[in-house]
């Protein structure tokens, strides 16, 4: 199995029930993480703290992988994220560009997605505001 195929399988398994601790199976200790609506991070520990704030906002967050493809230095993964913000269901498509290190762990992950679905869901439902503000304040 290629490194990209192995990572894609672990990525899909991770997103069925994501957790902060589970990031150890995907990310190298010195990983660069970039995503909309969150600060860029440069280590696994920073990434874990950032992801914890996301799980505070969307505690039932899951992802379904639809497709992936190998690149010269890693892979691209197309998936849909789903969950709820203060009980309001939300989902949005995303594509992650992942660079793999020699150990098969991600050394860089850049996530691409339209932030409008999440932002509009929060804006339209005042009961989501406290959770959203808590996630922003923790940054």
Image (cartoon, grey):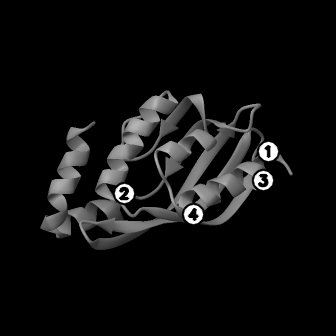
- Residue under label 2, please give it: 115
Q: Are marks 1 and 2 in contact (CB under 8 Å)?
A: no
Taking the spot 30% from the left edge, 52% from the top edge, the residue there is 56
- Residue under label 1, please give it: 3
- Residue under label 4, please give it: 79
The tag earlier along the polypeptide, 1 or 2, is 1
Taking the spot 50% from the left edge, 43% from the top edge, the residue there is 21
- Determine the image quadrant of residue 124: bottom left
The tag earlier along the polypeptide, 3 or 2, is 3
Q: Are marks 1 and 3 in contact (CB under 8 Å)?
A: yes
Q: Residue furthest front?
A: 21
The picture places residue 81, in percent across and down from the top left corner, at: 47, 64
- Looking at the image, which is closer to me, 69 or 9? 9
The tag earlier along the polypeptide, 1 or 4, is 1
In this view of the protein, can residue 41 be seen by the observer?
A: no
Disc 2 is placed on an element classified as loop
Distance between mark 1 and mark 3 Cα atoms: 6 Å
Distance between mark 1 and mark 4 Cα atoms: 19 Å
- Residue under label 3, please give it: 5
The tag earlier along the polypeptide, 4 or 2, is 4
The tag earlier along the polypeptide, 3 or 4, is 3
Disc 4 is placed on an element classified as strand
Question: Is the C terminus in the top left, top right, bottom left or bottom right quadrant?
Answer: top left
The picture places residue 115, in percent across and down from the top left corner, at: 36, 57
In the displayed structure, would residue 27 be above or below residue 97?
above
């Amino acid at each position: 199995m290629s490194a990209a195929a192995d990572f894609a399988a672990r990525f899909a398994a991770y997103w069925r029930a994501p957790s902060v601790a589970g990031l150890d199976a995907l990310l190298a200790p010195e990983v660069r993480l970039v995503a909309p609506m969150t600060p860029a991070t440069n280590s696994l520990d920073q990434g874990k703290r950032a992801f914890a704030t996301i799980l505070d906002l969307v505690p039932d967050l899951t992802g379904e992988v639809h497709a992936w493809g190998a690149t010269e230095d890693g892979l691209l993964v197309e998936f849909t994220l789903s969950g709820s913000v203060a009980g309001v269901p939300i989902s949005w498509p995303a594509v992650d560009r992942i660079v793999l290190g020699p150990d098969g762990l991600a050394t860089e992950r850049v996530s691409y997605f339209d932030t409008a679905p999440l932002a509009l869901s929060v804006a339209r439902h005042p009961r989501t505001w406290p959770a959203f503000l808590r996630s922003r304040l923790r940054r």
